[in-house]
Image (spheres, rainbow, N blue to C red):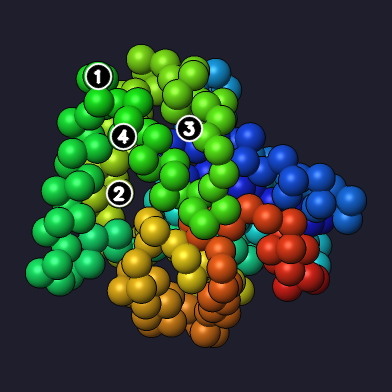
Amino acid sequence: MKQIIAVHGWGGDSGRWKDWIEAFKKDKWLWKSFDRGYGEISSATPQWSNRGSNNVTSRNVVICHSLGLHLIKSNILEKATDVVLLSSFSRFIPQEKSSRSLRIALNGMEKALGTQKEKTMFINFLRKCEYPSFKEFQPKTTLLTKLSLNGRKKLKEDLQLLIKSNSLPANFPSNARVLAIHGNEDLIINQSIKDQLIHDLNLHLNQPAINWNIPKIGHTLNNKEIILKVKKWLK
């Protein structure tokens, strides 16, 4: 059995996987999407299907975007045979003097939640996520149109989770095949954060992680060419 559990990042929702689901279901993958429930989509924490789990050829694939690696439940992650990390990190704030400005910016984002500055903060965040492909802004995202009171509370909690992240999650499977993908134009994840992830993965894993750096691509890593490359890698 081939199954995938996909986890979005901070401020996102399960709708980001639409093109991924379409591509993978053509090859008969069972796809399940986690959702934190920030907005109109209800929270969801899918579990692995046991059907065919004793088959030596069965595959449990986790796909995480950004903070998704830290949002995923450890009982799901520990059973993964393959892990695909999209713009992910082990530690978000680098151990450098220059990290002070990043910490200040993140604290500023947290303080903006629930205030008149919230919308501007979200727009700036989304522009950085979409760069360099960001075009005329279309405010259809949950962050601007459907954010709930409970969703705002979760955003604050998850921003703290991001700030405090300093290692790979507990129960990260050491025997999994791992593919880490970053865009060279990412305005959210800087190079030292990318390097730290690969360093931590290779210390932890039984086999080195595969690392792709994609030119002219930013943080979202959500185009069809990347989807097809990931599907080919998983074969």
Q: Pointer 2: what residue? A: 162
**Residue at point 28% right, 55% down?**
165
Q: Quadrant of the N terminus?
A: bottom right
Q: Pointer 3: what residue? A: 36
- Residue 90 is situated, as x and y percent measured from the top left of the image, at 35, 64
Q: Which numbered disc, 4 or 1, marks the residue that appears first in the sequence?
A: 1
Marks 3 and 4: which is nearer the front? Answer: 4
Q: CA distance from mark 4 to mark 2?
A: 17 Å
Quadrant in which residue 223 is drawn: bottom right
Are the two marked residues, 1 and 2, in contact with CB atoms closer than 8 angstroms? no
Q: Which numbered disc, 4 or 2, marks the residue that appears first in the sequence?
A: 4
Q: The residue under label 2 is which amino acid type?
A: Leu
Q: Secondary structure at mark 4?
A: helix
Q: CA distance from mark 2 to mark 3?
A: 14 Å
Q: CA distance from mark 4 to mark 1?
A: 10 Å
Q: Which numbered disc, 3 or 4, marks the residue that appears first in the sequence?
A: 3
Q: Is residue 131 left or right of residue 80?
A: left
Marks 3 and 1: which is nearer the front? Answer: 1
- Looking at the image, the residue that sits furthest to the top is 149
Q: CA distance from mark 3 to mark 1?
A: 24 Å
